[in-house]
Amino acid sequence: MKILIFSGTADGRALACRLADAGAEVTVCVATGYGAEEQGEHPGVTVLTGRMDADDMAALLPDYALCIDATHPYAREVSKNIRRACAETGVACRRLLRGESAAEGALSFASCAEAAAYLAGTAGNILLAIGSKELTAFAGLSADRLYPRVLPSHEAISACEALGIPHRNIIAMQGPFTKELNAALMRQKNIRFLVTKDGGAVGGFPEKAEAARETGAALILLRRPEEDGESMEALAAACEEMLKWK
């Protein structure tokens, strides 16, 4: 049984390896070289690298019995394209969901634009732990206040430079991070606001929330888009059951 997984997350990597070990021929699609590096090598798993639109996905899908969307919870456009391509090709699609986190005391916003509008009326340094793609939403704030934590890639650093963020403010590191490292960074940079997404336990959200509480910084949470899907264990078990009959 051939399974196509659109991934780029730790959950997706784990699922791909588990299904390959169960006997599936697994192809994992990741957008970047960084994603391919994180996926690594595993028997029975083939990795394809490169960004795809819905048409690219539809051209690939007919060779597979099942498609799994294991992309990031906030990758709404990618998930939309996956669903469209599966509908066009008639390939079954299942969605892998990360468990949501408890975020007591957090200030919750539906988008980066809403969070930026709130922060415009505040003072103090801001740690942006949201990746590099949505940094432009904060362009209206003073660049000196912004401390983006991004992947150590040319693309991510260039996104920071495009906003005029001083190089001394750019934190180019690969996570996830411990609570201790988060807190140390926040103290060193005198962070008063931490802006983050709920990446779940696998994405290091609890460690960020705990560091914010410890340092007294306000936690600004970007809410997940609502969607249906399955947990890792439920989806893996369902796929393993399918493999028994193939």
Image (spheres, helix red, strand yellow):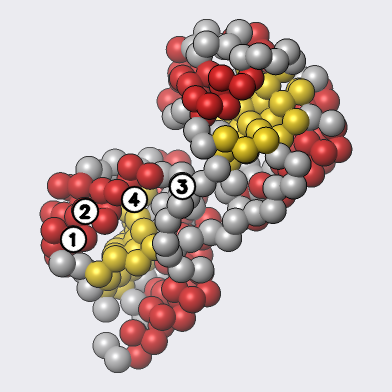
If the image is split into quadrants, where does the N terminus sit?
A: bottom left
Depth check, mark 3 against mark 4: the one in front is 3
Q: CA distance from mark 2 to mark 3?
A: 18 Å
Q: Is residue 120 above or below residue 16?
A: above
- Which residue position holds label 4? 79
The reply to whether dot 2 and dot 1 touch (C-beta < 8 Å) is yes
| Number of the label disc, if any, that sits on residue 58 | none
Picture quadrant where residue 246 is located: bottom left
Q: Position of residue 38 (x, y in %)?
A: 49, 50
Dot 1 falls on a residue whose secondary structure is helix
The three-letter amino acid code for the residue at tag 3 is: Pro
Picture quadrant where residue 85 is located: bottom left
Dot 3 falls on a residue whose secondary structure is loop
Name the N-terminal-most of marks 3 and 4. 4
* Residue visible at 34% across and 50% down in the picture: 79
Q: CA distance from mark 4 to mark 2?
A: 9 Å
* Apparent side of residue 34 relative to residue 213 in the rendered image (left or right): left
- Which residue position holds label 3? 225
Q: Is residue 221 above or below residue 124?
A: below
| Residue 215 in view (yes/no) | yes
Q: CA distance from mark 3 to mark 1?
A: 21 Å
Crowd rating for badge 4 (residues with CA inside 10 Å; few <14, some 14–19, many 20+): some
- Which residue position holds label 2? 84
In the foreground, 48 or 161: 161
Depth check, mark 3 against mark 1: the one in front is 3
Q: CA distance from mark 4 to mark 1?
A: 12 Å
* Apparent side of residue 205 relative to residue 34 in the rendered image (left or right): right
